[in-house]
Image (tube, coloured by chain):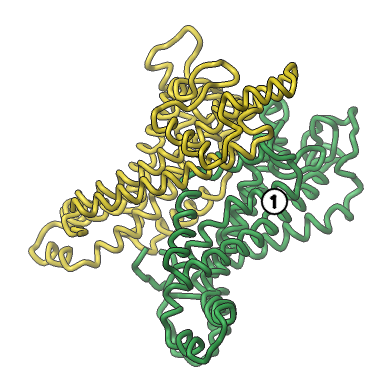
Amino acid sequence: MMAYLGRRLGQAALLLVVVSMIGFAILHLAPGGPMAQYAMGSNMSQEDLDRIAAQLGLDRPLPVQYAEWFWRMLGGNWGTSYRGGQPVLHVIGSHLGATLELMLTATLIAVVLGCWIGILGAIRRYSVFDYLATIGAMVALSIPTFWFGLVAIFIFSVELGWMPAGNRQTIGDGSLLDMLHHLIMPALVLALVETAIWSRFMRSSMLDVVNQDYIRTARAKGLPEWRVLSDHAFRNALLPMITVAGLQLPTLLGGALVTETVFTWPGMGRLFLDSIEYRDYPVVMGILMFSASLVLIGNLLADMLYAVADPRIRLG
Amino acid sequence: MSTTTQLLPATPADEALPPRNTAWRRFRRHRLAMLGAAIILILVLGSYAGPYLIPYNDTYIDIMQRFAPPFSGAHVLGTDELGRDMLARLMMGGRISLAVGFTAMLISMVIGISVGAIAGYYGGVVGSALMRFVDAVLCFPTIFLLLALAALIDPGVTSITLLIAATAWMDVARIVEGQIRALRERDFAVAAEALGASDRYIVFRELVPNAVAPIVVAATLNVAKAILLESYVSFLGYGIQPPVPSWGNMLNNAQIYLTSAPWLAILPGLLITLAVTSFNFLGDGLRDALDPRMESH
């Protein structure tokens, strides 16, 4: 077990290095590279620019620069925002809460709904419900999230006037009820794709499980069907879902970006787009690296959790 | 996932027919895939032939006619904020969106198959280095990566197509790598090697053709993915730039007019959804038809 965890940690660390290399490469692809901030100001002579480049260490060989950059990232120094002058990690941190709130709510909705649809589909395989759920999931995966958001705003905000069309709260009103009111629609929109994916994986996981010997044993010893399903089948079918949750992280983050844009949600996705708009490369890079690291850590945690939760897995 | 569930058991007649026939019969039984194929055909025909059949030009601005609702006058699907005919714009936008989706798929397949084949065939240090690179790129949420790259370049149809391809080949590489790694141990591959065939011959003449089923399925699903990605990046303003219409950038301004002219938002989105759903159903049907063992649940 420990050997497995150790190896897995080692792989993740290696992957983080490769991820950071990709990030570093993109940073240097940017027009003007890390010097863009000064080059755009154009009040400086070439001499000034050269001096700043030397001060920032940009005149040294790329591998050296990379090593220093990576070391600084590990130490938590992710540079400063061109726009506000604050440290990048600080800027990301101040937007992270809103994004996490949205992502966690959407995941909660998706897990509950998706598991329910998936289990029902597996129990009544090839029923009308199962077919509709299959088709529905396929369509849900094909709808552009931003468009679904626009349609939701059109119906529930413009036509019916039930829901606020955006933002995290009404200005001057920070009550829990008000925040929930603002949260419902974007969370549901973000949950659509997730629900579809969870329902598909839950269905096949459940189908894998109900054919196992221990389910037959449970039935043979006379357990009522609902207990066979809830105590034996469901709990085991849920195990592979840990991995699904990890694998879903990139999709979830990407969906959050789009949802936040449509609903003017003050999270990391909006910050990312605003930073692109202002050519605030340090923040753009910071969010890129931050989200990739989040995905990496999420997958690592999912694998470890799976190994802990499933007694059959004793990877040496 | 691992279980194999077959919708219908193979009939004895299935066994007797040559494989291609069986695949076609299985595909035809998949009604949603047939429907998807039909819709794709209609969308392609409509986008490419349609503009010649209607009296409006997609770039003709007619301020007096702006915001005409659909089914209300001379413009069947109404007009946009500049009085341009929506139907004409949807057709021209379809050309761009479908062409970008298809071309990006082709490029991403070439990259994905090459990387996957090399990694799967040679394995070892090269193989694991390539696959770790794939893993690393997959850590970045696709939209984040696409937007960051799109902000660095001059957006145009060609550059956006290339960028979408650059962010969509990793899944293909994973699929092909797994297939090639399994196939290269098989007798026919070992035999070809023993006969002194070159690596390139073995990979592209022996191994890749035997992995054609999952590759075709992945290609179909990749068109759907590429159309979606184009719509995302164009909607956010970093993709195809106006006045060239694409289904994605037509939605770019639509949010402002959601109250007064909702059709501007609803129509292009419907077409994106229709096209993407159709390619997804087609891919699903092809998966069932070409290789019943890997049928989706």
Q: Secondary structure at mark 1?
A: helix
Q: Is residue B132 visible?
A: yes
Q: Is residue A155 visible?
A: no
Task: Using residue A89 as the reference point, say whether residue B102 is left or right of it.
Answer: right
Q: Position of residue A130 (x, y in %)?
A: 40, 58
Residue furthest top in the image: A172
Q: Colour of chain A?
A: yellow
Q: Colour of chain B?
A: green
The residue located at (62%, 64%) in the rendering is B110
Residue closest to the eye, A39 or B279: A39
Residue closest to the eye, A45 or B61: A45
Q: Position of residue A172 (x, y in %)?
A: 48, 7
Q: Quadrant of the N terminus of chain B?
A: bottom left
Q: Say which residue label 1 marks.
A: B161
Kind of residue indicated by mark 1: Thr
Task: Using residue B110 as the reference point, say whether residue B157 is left or right of it.
Answer: right
Q: Quadrant of the C terminus of chain B?
A: bottom left
The residue located at (43%, 70%) in the rendering is B294
Task: Using residue A249 as the reference point, say whether residue A23 is left or right of it.
Answer: right
Instruction: Decide: is A248 above or below A288.
Output: below
Q: Position of residue A3 (x, y in %)?
A: 21, 54
Q: Chain of mark 1?
A: B
